[in-house]
Each structure stands twice: as C-alpha cells, then as structure tokens.
Image (cartoon, coloured by chain):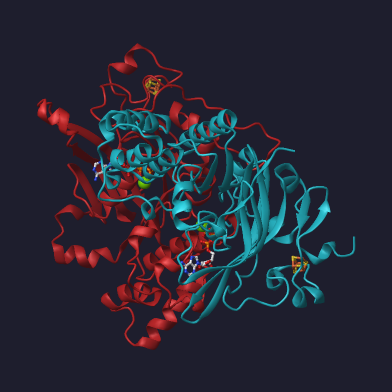
Amino acid sequence: MTGADAMTASGSTADMLLEVKGLTKHFRLNGDIYSKIAGEKTQLLKAVDGIDFHIRKGETLGLVGESGCGKSTTARLVTRLIEPTAGEVRLKDEDLLAFSPTRMKETRKDIQLVFQDPYSSLNPRKTIMHILSRPMEIHGLARTWAEKREKVLDLLHRVGLSAEHIDRYPHEFSGGQRQRIAIARALSVDPELVIGDEPVSALDVSIQAQILNLFRDLQEEFGLTYLFIAHDLSVIRHISDRVAVMYVGKIVETGPAAALFENPLHPYTKALLSAVPEADPDKAPPKLTLQGEVSTPIDPPPGCRLCGRCPRETAICAQTEPPLVDVGGDRQVACHNL
Amino acid sequence: MAETVLELDDLTVRFRLRRGDLTAVNGVSFSIARGETFGLVGESGSGKSVTARAIMRLIPDPPGEIQRGRILFEGDNILERSDAEMRALRGRRIAMVFQEPMSALNPVFTVCEQISDALRTNLGLTKQQARERVVELLALVGIPSPQQRVDSYVHEFSGGMRQRVMLAMALSCNPGFLIADEPTTALDVTIQATILELITSMIDKLGMSLLFITHNLGVVAHSCDTIGVMYASHMVERGKTREIFANPQHPYTVGLLNSIPRLDTQSKYLTPIQGSVCSMMDPPAGCKFHPRCTHAMDICRQKNPELKEVAPGHFAACHLHDRG
Ligand SMILES: Nc1ncnc2c1ncn2[C@@H]1O[C@H](COP(=O)(O)OP(=O)(O)OP(=O)(O)O)[C@@H](O)[C@H]1O
Ligand SMILES: Nc1ncnc2c1ncn2[C@@H]1O[C@H](COP(=O)(O)OP(=O)(O)OP(=O)(O)O)[C@@H](O)[C@H]1O
Ligand code: SF4
Ligand code: SF4
Ligand SMILES: [Mg+2]
Ligand SMILES: [Mg+2]
C-alpha cells in the first residue's frame, strides 16, 4: 500500500537515504490540577500518529501542514533529539533508532537540523566565530585557526553576512541574520541530509532567493538531500521534488511537487492552496474554505481528522480513518471521497 | 484625515559595539493614523525590529542608544516619559508581538500564568475571570482544545502556537496601538488568514492602529493601507500599498518585488537582487544601495538621497527623481 510499494515503483533501495515507517510520537498531557484531583485519566496528545515517508539521495521532500500538525516533532524524531513512541527510522537502510550513542554522535554530523527557532538554538554566550567553527573542530574538518576562520568567512559570505559579523554574539543580530547563522552552522560540517525547519521564514524575498539558490547549488555540487519544512507554499513549490502534506499528526497527501500543486486531490491540500495571498493588492484576498473549529490532536475521535471542517464529508468519514493509498503518478492520498 | 496616533520624526538608533558604532535606524520618519495599518518591509537587518523596539522603548542601553529624533504617541514624546510611565503604557495601550516568541515568553510559567498576569494587573480581573478570558483568547487565535492547553508550558507548543500565544497576550488588553513584528511567519496560510481576520476585526471594532512588520508581500498587499520600505537603516520608499505595488519608485523596491517566488511556476533558480548587502558598520558613502544598483550615477556615490515626494503621497529616496 504505502512505503514499500511506492519504493519499488519508483526506485531501488540503493538510492534511498531516509525511510520512515509508522513513526509515532504521543505526548502525555498532565492536565490541570483540578482534573488531577478529580482523578481524570491523563490525555494523550498525538503529535505524530503513524506516518510513512521516504527521501532518496539528492532529493528534496517538502513537508507542509497546519500549524501544530507535527512537522517539527517529525524533524526532532528523525534527528533523534526525541525518541518515538513507535515506528521505524532507517538511514541508508540501517536502523537509526538502534545506533549506539557513539555511532549516533558520528552520525549527527551527517544529519543537520536547522531549527525553527534560531533564537533558542544559538548559544547566547558564544561569538559567531565560535558557534560556526566548533562543529568543524569536533568533526575534524578544520584544524588551524586560520583554516577555521577562512571557512567561517566563506560560510558567512554564502549566507549574505560578512567579516564584520564574526566576533558578535547572537543577540546582536536581527531575526533573519540569526536564521542565516543557523543555516551556516548546519552547512559547516558537510552534512548529507539537511532538515530545514522553516529555514527561510525570517528572510526578505531577495535574501530568501539567494539562500534557496545556495541550497540548490549545494545539492547539485554535493548531492545534498533535504527535508524542507515551510509554510510558504511558493517556497515549497520552488525547492521540492516531492511534497508531503500533514494534517493533525497524519500525512494526508504526497506526490511530485508540480502535480500536487497543479491538481491537489485531498480537501485539506485544496483548502491550503486556495488560501495563499498573492502579492497583488488588486487581486481578491484569499477566501477561507475550511470552516469550523481547528481539529485537535488530543485524543482525536476515530475517523478522518478533517471531519467537521470538510466540504466533502460523508457518513463513512467519521467512522473509519481513510488510509493513505496510491492513486497513480507517484501520488498517494488519504480520503474516502476523492 | 483621521487623527495621527503615532509619529516618528528623524528616529536614529545606534549601537556602540566593540569594533565601532552601528547605526541601525537612520533618520526614519513616518506617521500612522487611527485605524490605519502601516506595513514595514525591507531587507533582513535593515532596522525594522529596532524601529519597533524603539517605539516600545526596549532598546538595550548600553550598547544601544536613541541618538536623535522624536517618537510621538498621541502627541506625546515617548522618549521623554519615565520608565514607570512607559510600563503603564506598554501592554495596556501599546502592545507588541515580538519577532521571536521565545525572546518574550517565559519558559517557567504556564501559558495561563503569562497571559493572565497582564489581565489581572491591567484590567483588574480575578484569577478565575482571567483564566476564563485566557481560554477564550486561545480559542480566538485558533489553539485547539484551549481548555486542555491553558496549563501547558510554551515549550510544549509548536512554533506557530507560540506565536499565537504572543498575539493573544498582546491583544488581551485591547490595545489602541499594536506593533506586530512578523506575527504570521510560523503559521500556515489558513491559520494566517484566521489571524489576519481577527486583527482586522480589532481594527474595525476598536479603531486599533497597527504597525505591521513582515516579509510576506502577499500579506502586505492585502492587509496594509500604507507601506514603508527599509534598506540599510534608511526608509527608502513610502506610499499607499496600491501605489507601491503598481508603481515602485526606488530600485531596491523594484528588485524586492521581482524576487518574489511564484506559486504558479517552478523555476530552478530564483532572481535575488545582485550583489550583497552593504556593511552597517562601515556603510558606503552616498546612497547605500549604489553598489548594487543598476542605475547608479556619480552623484549616488557622493550624496545620500533624501526622501522626496514623487507623486501625491508617494515618497522615494533616489537621485533618479532629482531632475523631475
Ligand atoms: N514537548 C511537548 N509536550 C507536549 N506537547 C508537545 C510537545 N512538543 C510538541 N507538542 C505538541 O505536538 C503538536 C505538534 O507540534 P509541532 O511542533 O510538531 O508542530 P508543527 O507542525 O511544527 O507546527 P508549527 O507549524 O506551528 O511549527 C502540537 O500540538 C504541540 O503542542
Ligand atoms: N542588540 C543589538 N546589538 C547590536 N546590533 C544590533 C542589535 N540589534 C540589532 N542590531 C543590528 O541592527 C541592524 C538592524 O536590526 P533589526 O533587528 O532592526 O533588523 P530587521 O530589519 O528587523 O531584520 P530582520 O528582517 O532580519 O528581522 C542589524 O544590522 C543588526 O545586526
Ligand atoms: S475522508 Fe471525508 S472528511 Fe476526510 S478529507 Fe476525505 S471527504 Fe473529507
Ligand atoms: S540614488 Fe542612485 S544608487 Fe541609489 S537607488 Fe537611486 S539610482 Fe540607485
Ligand atoms: Mg514547527
Ligand atoms: Mg526583525
């Protein structure tokens, strides 16, 4: 149905870099003190609830979805910053979750995460020189001070910063400058897989274009693989080979970027694409096609999670959860009423 | 013409760093009327957030310093107010959504505690009333199951949920003036639309004025009445939204509008403005944009262009307009 078939249909395991199967993360909510006294059972927040996807070497998978649907949690699971409740993560056909701490430490160099929140991810007490050169040092990629400095300057230049920034501390930068420092840090150790969690969201469109071109260059030159999370759908469309759309812990649609954008199949994907405001004041502002309350990941009811908001909903939707099925053209959709 | 709520006059902010001075905001002037939405856009690092923080009087001093200028809020120069007077103003009458939520949210307090604090001091609500109001506010900004989430800590929230907590906090006391620094960057387009609708309703109902900083030109096009464009600490263009989009007069603005990635085509490479951003500590003489400008003339390398009216209500700082 999903992972395995799609794989044999569109490529061998040899060029598979990352494979995720049934990945699940449930958080236990403690609830407020009143419900504790009342002895109510703790609730489960199903942040990521059994997702499958794969990324081939040199490919870019775009991950989009509603705020709070589990994208950053997925990124943290794949980099093993948190451990899953269930599921499998395979890196080059090896079980990543079984890696020993030493092995994992070495592997960290190859899988770099650009955090969604650069403010919290950069050490406030270290200069940019230190922040960017320390990982190179740890992984033996630069030894002498001169060598490190040269590499750091090159990285800064590539992300649109310069020598005047090298001795400053993270709080002495603008939001977008900090974001670019986080990108430079991820790129500093010659990774194989870069997971960008909203890596260009704080940049003006010109610098954003420059950074996206840089990602593209590195991919051409070194065969880098990307998992790219973003809310800006034009950015996703531009950078991705394939796209996965998430809704409340589930993947509801995947497919090649061009096909998915030109002809979205899942009602949530459709709603998403119709809500993009165009940079033209004379065009009508986007209309909201999803009605009703945002769906909750806390003990979600059975059935499709879009129930109550979906314009195509029928009786079966609230009863059984729609599985993600192949619909041809390397596309998969989870909906009863296509 | 509606009454002016905020007026910036020649605002200049500088940071004294170890290696020299950095002028982050240089002679910026604009005004915002009651009920108006003013969009501040421009290059990353050009001084938008510093401008916003100056209005809130939140520039760290040292190393920061407001070197020149006035900030008139309802006719009153904020820069002359005492710290106690500023505290009374902040939150209650001027509120701000910060660009990076974690820089303003406290990790050791629950969401309820953070938001209800202001409600209790500013509006005099009881603990229980404040809690109910917080749940309502969370629902308004689209947090699912607010009743169950109100006792969570911010690290248990997603990036976009934190941003919405900040917004809920800023809107909690019905401020007359809101500064929103990138309030929707961590939101998907559908929740973004919900949030923009909520802000618009506050503008309509309460006559709130808004200083809206964002890189999202799609949002700017539909939400802002007026736009100011910043480049390397200067305001280089200002005018009505329609005018700026239809008829940009500064070469930087033109380049910016040309860099927007499009949804309907998939090109391999995008077209950023050529060249790189100038140094802020040792900026070039004359027009700061001249090393990257395809129209640069001799005078551009010598003299900094002043912001001049190029059409009614439309201002640009560029020597190309000297002749006319
Ligand atoms: N440590 C945690 N404890 C409890 N709940 C958590 C924790 N981390 C995340 N969550 C919850 O898991 C859900 C998914 O969060 P996640 O950060 O993955 O969302 P996201 O898709 O990245 O959203 P955004 O686009 O807003 O960044 C949210 O409801 C969030 O509150
Ligand atoms: N606390 C500080 N100390 C020193 N320099 C600072 C400080 N805060 C900001 N700066 C500098 O001032 C300039 C303006 O910063 P500001 O944060 O206003 O940019 P911005 O326009 O908001 O950019 P972005 O779009 O990236 O958020 C930048 O060059 C930045 O490096
Ligand atoms: S399964 Fe039903 S509710 Fe879910 S998306 Fe499809 S039509 Fe809508
Ligand atoms: S003043 Fe000169 S360099 Fe500056 S934007 Fe105008 S033409 Fe270009
Ligand atoms: Mg996230
Ligand atoms: Mg900023």
Q: Position of residue A226 (x, y in %)?
A: 40, 55
| Viewer can see residue B271 | no
Q: Position of residue A142 (x, y in %)?
A: 34, 81
Chain with red colouring: A
At horizontal 29% and vertical 78% (from top left) the residue drawn is A137
Above or below — where is A166 with respect to A311?
A: below
Colour of chain B in the rendered structure image = cyan
* Extreme-right residue of the structure: B324
At horizontal 35% and vertical 64% (from top left) the residue drawn is A122
> Is residue B250 toward the left or the right of residue A169 in the image?
right
Quadrant that contains the N terminus of chain B? top right
Q: Position of residue A333 (x, y in %)?
A: 39, 30
Above or below — where is B134 with respect to B216?
A: above
Q: Which is nearer the eye, B186 or A9?
A: B186
Q: Which is nearer the eye, A112 or B137?
A: B137
* Extreme-top residue of the structure: A315
